Every structure is written in structure tokens, then in C-alpha cells.
Image (tube, rainbow, N blue to C red):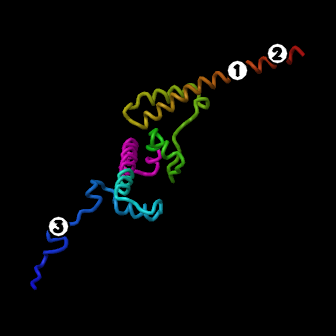
Amino acid sequence: MVFVKGSGGRGRGKKSVTKTKRAGLTFPVARVGKHLRRMKIANRVGTGAMVYCAAVLEYLCAEVLELAGNCALDHKKKRIIPRHIQLAVRNDEELNKLFNNVTIAEGGVLPNIHAVLLSKKSAARMKAALLSQDSSNKSAAGMKAALLSQESSKKSAAGMKAALLSENRGKKSQDSKK
């Protein structure tokens, strides 16, 4: 009986191809599958579920990092810090909806001053500064939307002030009649 080397098994020259490479992803499919099995969501976890979950995670990560990178460039920084991630997520409508119950450590809050609290001169300066910024910038677009909502709330606040003044005048006239 003669044994020939390399005649059985996988064979020589063939390298194993990982699930991640087969799927064309960057996120590790096997590791995602391991965590899915550990969470005990189901008794059995198929390969398709692992690949799909890894692809979704990779897409979300890429989206957040792209927007945060743009935000960092807007602030003339080369590194993404938690503040940039916070601004990117909160200025994007869909990501904000996904992250609505998430607190980003060291992220801060969105810059927002209610229009009623601003003087007329500073409100006009703020409006001019926002409108002069590049409209393709997503953070500027978010600030413009905030400004428009502030203007609408300012109109409603002005209406409320007028109603309160008319009520006070009515009370004063009733008091003077007594």
C-alpha cells in the first residue's frame, strides 16, 4: 500500500476563504454569528442571518463615520471626537430617529437658542450668518431647519404675547370700572 502525499482532504494550494471575504464585507461575519448564538435569540442561527446582520452593522457604521467626518472637517479638525458624532447623528433625520434614546458620552447638545430669548438684532445677525453658509453642508442645513422652526415658533410666541397683553388690558379695564 502506497500513500501519496496531498491526495486527500482539502488538497494543496487551496486557501480557505472566510465568510467575510465571501460576502464582500469588512465586518467579521463569524464574530457577529458567535454573538448572535451567545444571545440565544434562537436555537439555530443560519449563515444568512450572520451575513445580513454584519452588513447592516457595517452600513450603519459607515454612515455615522461619514457624517461625523464631514462634521469634523467643518470644524477644521482631522480627528473625529464624540461631539462630531453627536452633531452628525442629531442633524440627520433618520439617524436621529434611530438614536433617539441614546446618550453619546461627551457629545454635548445641539446649539439652539429659542427665538423669543434673542433680541431682534442678534436674531437678524444669526439668520444672515446661517443663510450665508454653504447649503450643501448638512450641519448648516440642520441649523437652517432649526432657524425656520424658531421663526414659526417666534410668530406663535408673538401671537401669544399679543393675546396675553389683550387679556391684561381687559382685566385692567374691568378693574377700573369697579
Residue with the mark numbered 1: 163
Mark 3 residue type: Lys
Please say if the residues under marks 2 and 1 sit with CB atoms less than 8 Å apart.
no
Quickly name the residue at label 3.
14
Q: Is residue 160 above or below residue 140?
A: above
Residue 59 on the magenta segment: yes
Q: Which residue is mark 2?
A: 173
Badge 3: how crowded within 10 Å, few (<14), some, or many (20+)? few
User: Which contiguous range is marked in magenta?
Assistant: 58-86
Residue drawn at x 59%, y 27% as measured from the top left: 153
Q: CA distance from mark 2 to mark 3?
A: 96 Å
**Residue type marked 1:** Ala
Q: CA distance from mark 3 to mark 1?
A: 82 Å
Magenta segment, principal secondary structure? helix
The residue tagged with tag 2: helix, strand or loop?
A: helix
Relative side of 122 to 37, left or right: right
Badge 2, how many Cα within 10 Å: few under 14, some, many 20+?
A: few
* Front position among marks 2 and 1: 1
**Residue 128 sits above or below residue 72 on the image:** above
Dot 2 or dot 1: first in sequence order is 1
Q: Is residue 38 left or right of residue 14?
A: right
Q: Nearer the viewer, residue 2 or 91?
A: 2
N-term-proximal mark, 3 vs 1: 3
Q: Which of disc 3 and disc 2 is earlier in sequence?
A: 3
Q: Position of residue 110 (x, y in %)?
A: 51, 41
